[in-house]
Amino acid sequence: MENEELTEKIIGAAIEVHRVLGPGLLESAYEAALAHELTLRGVRYERQKEMPVNYKGYLIEVGYRLDLLVEDQVVVELKAVTEMHPIFEAQLITYLKLSKRRVGLLINFNVPLLKEGVTRRIV
């Protein structure tokens, strides 16, 4: 599946979650609901995938976890915040580099319209 097609499927699933649940819940609720919605749509994913840091060939287990890794291609970082900060996008880019993936989505569910809370990045 092409990355653009896959990210559209993920965004569509996130829109459905937001339509049903609305804003104001914890990130963990949106993660669980989005995972379920992806399952309903036949999209493979891993939740809370461990992401070690490789420092000069030494793996550092520091507890970083990707919220979702979809189809082993797209890193999805979820938020439920009133204000997006540049550090969230920097975090997504770092996760892309650490995971050696090119495409990521940063999705904030705490917005009136979900399309206002979606950022797509390619590195």
Image (tube, rainbow, N blue to C red):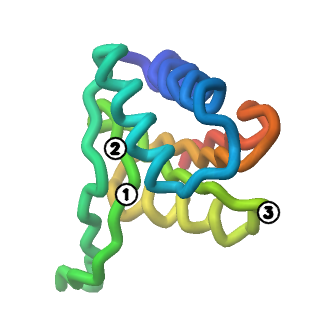
Q: CA distance from mark 1 to mark 2?
A: 7 Å
Q: Position of residue 72 (x, y in %)?
A: 27, 37
Other-residue count near label 1 (Cα within 10 Å), few / some / many at <14 / 14–19 / ≥20? many
Where residue 116 sits: x, y (%)?
A: 79, 38
| SS type, badge 3 | loop
Kind of residue at disc 3: Glu
Q: At label 2, which amino acid type do we have?
A: Leu
Residue at the spot of label 1: 66
- The image quadrant that residue 90 belongs to is bottom right
Q: Which mark is residue 31?
A: none
Residue that badge 3 annotates: 83
Secondary structure category for the residue under label 2: strand
Q: From the top left corner, tell me how far across and down residue 38 is, in percent.
A: 37, 25
**Residue name at image x 26 percent, y 28 percent:** 44
Q: Which residue is mark 2?
A: 69
Residues at marks 1 and 2 touching, judged by CB atoms closer than 8 Å: yes
The mark that comes first in sequence, 1 or 3, is 1
8 to 75, vertically: above or below: above
Direction from residue 117 to residue 21 in the image, left or right: left
